[in-house]
Image (tube, grey):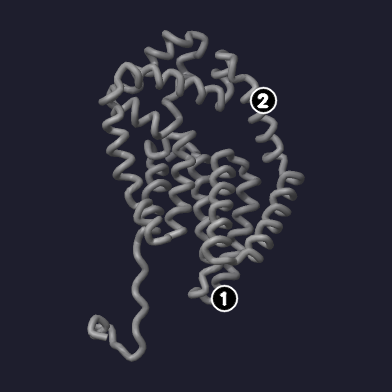
């Protein structure tokens, strides 16, 4: 059965793998061989992310990486490791920029795209420009239906109607839903629905901050940044990206058994 490739969500999964692997590399409870294998995998995925050259993936990986290095320095006082890792990654990134045409083309295309933001016609052919105009259309609908939105069922109709009124230069086949999860929720469910979403989705992040669960915090950074440029949770792979790995990172580790205690008697030890 033919499927539509989803390179953006795929790049987010790579970012999650790189950041989670980076945390595991410095987890001294793991065997040294596993840590070395994980480090090799992290480096390969870091390089592949540049070869793939998806803006969302690169942005989430770098922002999460800076946060992780900051945590490694301030929380664990491992500044020498932070410096060494930063130099290594900077060298790898520089090499990727010089060697990968895909990355060079992405930078050139992004600059060209952003230079056309003032041209409505450019929304027919340029993705960044098209996203910007989808936000403008969405905000008009939000102002008209601020509390409860228009419902997800009527979103297509409402967006198409507003597109035709505001920007007749944009062809119907290039109409976009708002590529921002927060704006998308406001259009569909209003401020009330957005509030419920924020409370339900980000409550585990509050717990992660209290417990200093850096892995979960980093995964939240990846997903939240993706929310700014995509309606991540509106596809099957998006739900997998946004929820499955967050729930996996939330799962508490099993307690270490006490020496000399049998499993049935562990509670009494």
Q: Which one is in front, 243 or 145?
A: 145
Check disc 2: other Cα within 10 Å, few if <14, some if 14-19, many if 20+.
Answer: few
Q: Which mark is residue 146?
A: none
**Residue 243 picture location, percent across and down:** 37, 49
**Residue 50 picture location, percent across and down:** 64, 46
Q: Quadrant of the N terminus?
A: top left
Q: Which residue is mark 2?
A: 112
Q: Quadrant of the C terminus?
A: bottom left
Residue at the spot x=72%, y=44% of the render?
97
Distance in Å between CA atoms under marks 2 and 1? 46 Å
In the visual, does 29 lie left or right of 248? Answer: right
The outermost residue toward the right is: 98
87 above or below 199? below
Give the SS element for disc 2. helix
For marks 2 and 1, the one nearer the N-term is 1
Q: Which one is in front, 112 or 125?
A: 112
Residue at the spot x=33%, y=91% of the render?
260
Check disc 1: other Cα within 10 Å, few if <14, some if 14-19, many if 20+.
Answer: few
Q: How many marks?
A: 2
The outermost residue toward the bottom is: 260
156 above or below 42? above
Q: Which mark is residue 32?
A: 1
Residue 121, quarter of picture: top right
**Residue 175 picture location, percent across and down:** 45, 20
Residue at the spot x=43%, y=14% of the render?
163
**Residue 93 picture location, percent across and down:** 69, 49
């Amino acid at each position: 059965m033919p499927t539509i490739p989803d390179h953006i969500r795929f790049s987010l999964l790579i970012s999650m793998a790189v950041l989670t692997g980076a945390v595991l590399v410095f987890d001294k409870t793991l065997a040294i061989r596993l840590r070395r294998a994980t480090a090799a995998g992290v480096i390969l995925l870091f390089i592949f992310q540049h070869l793939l050259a998806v803006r969302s993936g690169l942005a989430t990986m770098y922002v999460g990486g800076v946060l992780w290095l900051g945590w490694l320095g301030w929380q664990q006082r491992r500044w020498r490791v932070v410096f060494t890792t930063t130099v290594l990654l900077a060298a790898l990134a520089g090499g990727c920029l010089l060697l990968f045409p895909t990355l060079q083309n992405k930078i050139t295309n992004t600059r060209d795209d952003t230079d056309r933001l003032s041209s409505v016609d450019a929304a027919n052919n340029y993705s960044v420009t098209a996203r910007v105009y989808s936000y403008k259309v969405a905000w008009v609908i939000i102002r008209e239906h601020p509390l409860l939105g228009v419902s997800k069922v009527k979103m297509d109709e409402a967006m198409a109607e507003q597109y035709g009124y505001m920007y007749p230069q944009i062809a119907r086949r290039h109409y976009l839903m708002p590529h921002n999860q927060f704006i998308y929720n406001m259009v569909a469910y209003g401020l009330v629905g957005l509030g419920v979403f924020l409370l339900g989705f980000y409550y585990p992040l509050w717990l992660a901050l209290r417990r200093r669960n850096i892995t979960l915090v980093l995964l939240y950074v990846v997903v939240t940044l993706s929310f700014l440029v995509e309606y991540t949770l509106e596809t099957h792979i998006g739900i997998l990206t946004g929820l499955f790995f967050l729930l996996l990172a939330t799962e508490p580790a099993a307690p270490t058994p006490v020496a000399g205690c049998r499993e049935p008697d562990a509670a009494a030890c």
